Amino acid sequence: MIVKEGKTVSFEYTLTVDGEVVDSSKERGPFQYTHGKGQIIPGLSSRLEGLTTGDEKSIDVPAKEAYGEINPEAFREIPKTALPTNIEPKVGMLLQMKGEGDQTLTTKVSAVNNDTIVLDLNHPLAGKALTFQVKIVSIE
């Protein structure tokens, strides 16, 4: 069996960004998805294509094929008064906010001004090249 459109693929992975491990399937077990259904980032999907059970590979995915480049239009300035009173914003702090349809969005504080803060609504891995160490566990 090979990884191709419509196949259910299970793989173990370790994700490294800027030389640091940011995620791994070690504790959770293999990740499972249906190939070609848009369930994983495009750059990883295309590089898994054609692998077989037991294959191990290091896969580099550029930002544009992962979570995209940083979008300068995805920054929003909001008044500090919009935050709960118990939160003292700091640059780099992650905040949860409600989006459309009660979807929870994670944002990052990119600037703190006197009366406002600037939120970065980009995906936390936007603008980052990703390196995956993968092992194909099964293909059905």
Image (spheres, rainbow, N blue to C red):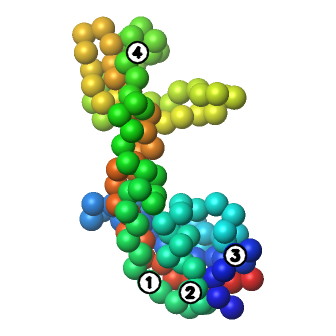
Q: Secondary structure at mark 3?
A: loop
Which quadrant is the N terminus positioned in?
A: bottom right
Whether residue 37 is visible: yes
Task: Name the image quarter holding residue 81.
Answer: top left
Q: Sequence order check: which comes first, mark 1 or mark 4?
A: 1
Image height check: is 103 above or below 30?
above
> Pointer 3 and pointer 4: residues touching (CB < 8 Å)?
no
| Left or right: 121 as drawn, with respect to 36 | left
Residue 13: image x %, image y %? 49, 73
Residue nearer the viewer, 102 or 47: 47
Instruction: Identify the residue under disc 2.
Output: 51
> Label 3, label 1: how many angstroms apart (C-alpha)?
19 Å
Q: Can you tell which of label 4 and label 2 is closer to the viewer?
A: 2
Q: Can you tell which of label 3 and label 2 is closer to the viewer?
A: 3
Instruction: Identify the residue under disc 3.
Output: 5
Residue 80: image x %, image y %? 37, 12
> Pointer 4 and pointer 2: residues touching (CB < 8 Å)?
no
> Label 1, label 4: how many angstroms apart (C-alpha)?
44 Å
Q: Sequence order check: which comes first, mark 4 or mark 2?
A: 2
> Pointer 2 and pointer 1: residues touching (CB < 8 Å)?
yes
Q: Amino acid at mark 1?
A: Lys
